């Protein structure tokens, strides 16, 4: 049995089975990337709910694994060299899981780097811009009621990024073509989330991006997505 005692987070969220991947997350656009990937890869894992309502992500135990205080994070008891490894940042975790299994990433070097660039496109563009749009459109609407600039600025940039994705998906089933990869997994939860979480479908003019909408439906319909989108389960 793996010894995870070197990770303080396991004292607050004990591992029932320390021999499998421990996932610390919440079903947000960032959080579900990893649960979806784990489901796609059929890797055994144990999810632990990190509640924003009680600021779990700011607790000393969580910060010991991710000093940035953001979900998701994982511990893999079977990391490089057979030793446990802790990781944070969803993009880094997806790359790690793909390379660990040899799946969800093209086997050739050129394809690998092309996939990673689209992962970075989401991490540096779609995630932050959609997130800021959602913040000002939904959560801070009253604070900016007399100032339309924040919503307009992030709305317009989000639309621009959707246009980049729309162009990429012309005559493509997935971002990398015929193969479903971590580029899709990292991106589609944010496109879905801008609608489901932020109610931004109309403002972002989703109907103007038919290739993106068709791709989004394909992503959501995958069995691993249907399951992973709800892991870890929120309290009833």
Image (tube, rainbow, N blue to C red):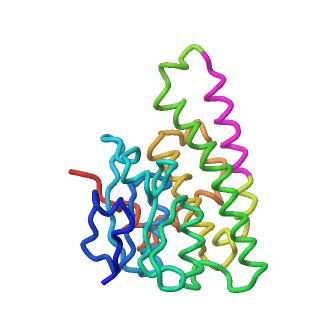
Given the current orientation, which residue lies at the most extreme front position? 6
Q: Quadrant of residue 113?
A: bottom right
Q: Residue at x 33, y 65 (%)?
A: 47
Question: How many discs mark residues in the rendered view?
Answer: 0
What kind of secondary structure does the magenta stretch mostly adopt?
helix
Task: Give the percent coordinates (x, y) of residue 109.
Answer: 76, 81
User: Which residue is at the front of the view, 13 or 196?
Assistant: 13
Task: Give the percent coordinates (x, y) of residue 19.
Answer: 34, 81
Q: Residue at x 39, y 74 (%)?
A: 21
Task: Give the percent coordinates (x, y) of residue 69.
Answer: 47, 48
Q: Residue at x 49, y 79 (%)?
A: 79
Quadrant into which the N terminus falls: bottom left
Q: Is residue 118 left or right of residue 46?
A: right
Given the current orientation, which residue lies at the most extreme right position? 110
Q: Quadrant of residue 201?
A: top right
Given the current orientation, which residue lies at the most extreme top position? 146
Q: Is residue 48 magenta?
A: no
Residue 215, above or below 163: below
Tell me where the magenta segment starts and ends, as one range. 147-163
Residue 91, above or below 191: below
User: Which residue is at the front of the view, 16 or 30?
Assistant: 16
Residue 83, above or below 15: below
Task: Give the percent coordinates (x, y) of residue 187.
Answer: 59, 59
Q: Residue at x 60, y 49 (%)?
A: 127
């Amino acid at each position: 049995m793996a010894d995870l005692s070197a990770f303080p987070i396991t004292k607050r969220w004990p591992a029932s089975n320390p021999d499998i991947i421990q996932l610390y997350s919440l079903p947000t656009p960032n959080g579900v990337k990893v649960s979806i990937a784990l489901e796609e890869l059929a890797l055994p894992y144990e999810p632990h709910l990190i509640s924003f309502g009680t600021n779990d992500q700011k607790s000393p135990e969580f910060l010991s694994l991710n000093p940035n205080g953001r979900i998701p994070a994982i511990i893999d008891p079977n990391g490089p060299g057979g030793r446990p490894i802790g990781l944070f940042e969803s993009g880094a975790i997806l790359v790690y899981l793909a390379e660990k299994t040899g799946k969800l990433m093209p086997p050739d070097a050129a394809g690998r780097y092309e996939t990673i660039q689209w992962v970075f496109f989401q991490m540096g563009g779609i995630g932050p811009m959609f997130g800021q749009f959602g913040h000002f459109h939904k959560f801070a609407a009253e604070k900016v009621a007399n100032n339309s600039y924040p919503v307009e600025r992030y709305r317009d940039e989000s639309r621009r990024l959707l246009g980049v994705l729309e162009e990429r998906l012309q005559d493509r089933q997935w971002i990398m073509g015929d193969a479903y990869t971590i580029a899709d997994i990292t991106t589609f939860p944010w496109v879905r989330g801008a609608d489901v979480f932020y109610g931004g479908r109309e403002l972002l003019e989703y109907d103007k991006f038919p290739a993106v909408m068709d791709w989004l439906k394909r992503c959501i319909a995958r069995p691993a997505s249907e399951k992973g989108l709800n892991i870890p389960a929120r309290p009833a």
